[in-house]
Image: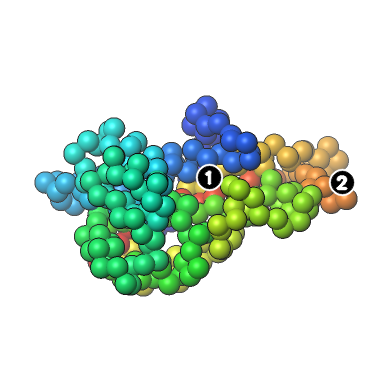
């Protein structure tokens, strides 16, 4: 079942601040946390006496773990983070943090143990850093226990703010944002949903949230001569025209998708 919740404008506009690269860095954590809370409800409804176990893959400095711990102090939260400095800080807020990459799951047994015993597995802004995210996703799905949930937060390259950068600068990597030099893969919203639909071979349900991009939305202007049509300038030579509120319009003002995949069996 696909439950699409579009554009949580109030929370995004009131609580988020942009960094120097124009990237709404905090929004993924907040949107991901909404899915964590929903998955926790499913776990508690299934096993009321269970203390849920969360695994945050690519946990960074432990920011999401800190937020979860504030409202759920008794939950078990483990992490995986390849950067040693980050993992050492995240360990202050987690029960256990492995200094490793999720891509080491085949050779590093402790990762597989956490994947097979966790109730909620989080990969927030991780897939774009992986060489083969399709295999990683497929294998994690096979490893998860029945009733567990997998939460993915994946940025998309197809919003117009990103496309305008391509037209102005060409394809050049940056220190952070969608063109981060550590990114191996780039996704459109359709790529993400296609990956999940084709590679989730177990019975499952999903919930999808589109992470709204205000910078992209503000680039569009109403067309006074063509009702229902909007346009935006990608550079001095290129103007994009599109039907307002169409699927393409929604994709062009979406920064990323946050998807919960809940395994039924």
What residue do we see at 43% from left, 39% from top? 30
Q: Vertically, is 112 above or below 231?
A: below
Residue 227 falls in image quadrant: top right
Q: Quadrant of the N terminus?
A: bottom left
Pointer 1 or 2: first along the chain: 1
Q: Residues within 10 Å of mark 2 (few under 14, many from 20)?
A: few
Q: Residues within 10 Å of mark 1 (few under 14, many from 20)?
A: many
Residue corresponding to mark 1: 211
Location of residue 113 in the rendering, given as x and y in whole percent from the top left corner:
23, 64
Q: Is residue 109 visible?
A: yes
Location of residue 10 in the rendering, given as x and y in whole percent from the top left corner:
51, 30
Which residue is farthest left?
49
From the viewer's perspective, tell me whether residue 119 is left or right of residue 209.
left
From the viewer's perspective, tell me whether residue 41 is left or right of residue 240.
left
The image shows a total of numbered marks equal to 2
Q: Is label 1 or label 2 in front?
A: 2
- For numbered disc 2, what is the local secondary structure? loop
Q: Vertically, is 248 above or below 32?
A: below
Which residue is farthest top?
14
Q: Is residue 251 visible?
A: no
Which residue is farthest right?
237
Residue 224 falls in image quadrant: top right
What residue do we see at 25% from left, 54% from top? 119
Residue corresponding to mark 2: 236
Location of residue 85 in the rendering, given as x and y in whole percent from the top left corner:
40, 46
What residue do we see at 88% from left, 50% from top? 237
């Amino acid at each position: 079942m696909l439950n699409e919740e579009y554009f949580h404008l109030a929370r995004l506009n009131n609580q988020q601040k942009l960094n120097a690269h124009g990237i709404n860095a905090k929004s993924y954590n907040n949107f991901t946390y909404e899915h964590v809370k929903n998955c926790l409800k499913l776990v508690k409804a299934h096993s009321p006496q269970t203390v849920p176990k969360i695994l945050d893959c690519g946990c960074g400095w432990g920011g999401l773990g800190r937020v979860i711990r504030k409202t759920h102090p008794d939950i078990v939260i483990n992490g995986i983070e390849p950067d040693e400095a980050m993992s050492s800080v995240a360990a202050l807020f987690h029960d256990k943090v492995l200094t490793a990459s999720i891509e080491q799951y085949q050779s590093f047994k402790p990762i597989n143990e956490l994947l097979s015993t966790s109730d909620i597995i989080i990969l927030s802004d991780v897939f774009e850093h992986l060489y083969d995210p399709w295999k990683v996703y497929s294998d994690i799905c096979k490893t998860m226990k029945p009733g567990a949930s997998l939460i993915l937060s994946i940025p998309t390259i197809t919003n117009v703010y990103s496309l305008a950068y391509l037209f102005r600068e060409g394809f050049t990597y940056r220190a952070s944002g969608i063109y981060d030099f550590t990114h191996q893969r780039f996704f459109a919203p359709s790529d993400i949903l296609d990956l999940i639909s084709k590679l989730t071979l177990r019975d499952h349900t999903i919930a999808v949230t589109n992470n709204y991009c205000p910078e992209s939305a503000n680039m569009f202007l109403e067309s006074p001569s063509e009702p229902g049509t909007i346009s935006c300038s990608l550079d001095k030579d290129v103007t994009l025209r599109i039907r307002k509120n169409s699927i393409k319009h929604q994709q062009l003002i979406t920064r990323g998708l946050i998807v919960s995949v809940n395994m039924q069996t």
